[in-house]
Image (cartoon, rainbow, N blue to C red):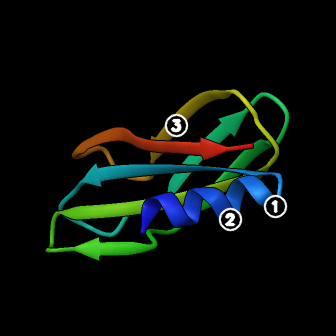
Amino acid sequence: MFRRLASIVAALGLMLMTLRHSATDNQTLTVTFQNAGTITVSPDQVKASYDLHYDVYTNGNDTLLAASTSGDTGILILKDICGS
């Protein structure tokens, strides 16, 4: 599934970053990119009660400068990156 999605993302000239957060509540994610600026997103998936997944798209390749969540609990990790 991810390989197919990666092919589609690359064909469209986009970049996709998937981040995962272990949190006890529903938190938003704020990411800052060198070119795209700051983007805030809600979880795309909530797996179990402590596993939040965020998908962030940018137009073309970009550099992630910072990432944080709206709460102060849990661990945030960069899970996948795909792009053109």
Q: Quadrant of residue 43?
A: bottom left
* Residue 67 - label: 3
Q: Which of marks 1 and 3 is nearer the N terminus?
A: 1
Residue, x 30% and y 44% (percent of image)?
72
Front-lying residue, 77 or 60: 60
Front residue of 83 and 79: 83
- Where does residue 54 sit, x and y in percent of width and height? 46, 60
Q: At x 44% / y 52%, what residue is drawn? A: 70
User: Helix, strand, or loop for circle 1?
Assistant: loop
- In the picture provided, is 12 more to the left or to the right than 26? right
Q: In this view, does 25 lie above or below 29?
A: below
Query: Mark 1 sits on what residue?
Result: 12
Pointers 2 and 1 in contact (C-beta within 8 Å): yes
Amino acid type, callout 3:
Ala
Q: Distance between the residues labelled 2 and 1?
A: 6 Å
Query: Which SS class for mark 2?
Result: helix
Q: Residue at x 42, y 49 (%)?
A: 19
Q: How far apart are marks 3 and 2 (CA)?
A: 25 Å
Q: Quadrant of the N terminus?
A: bottom left
| Amino acid, disc 1 | Leu
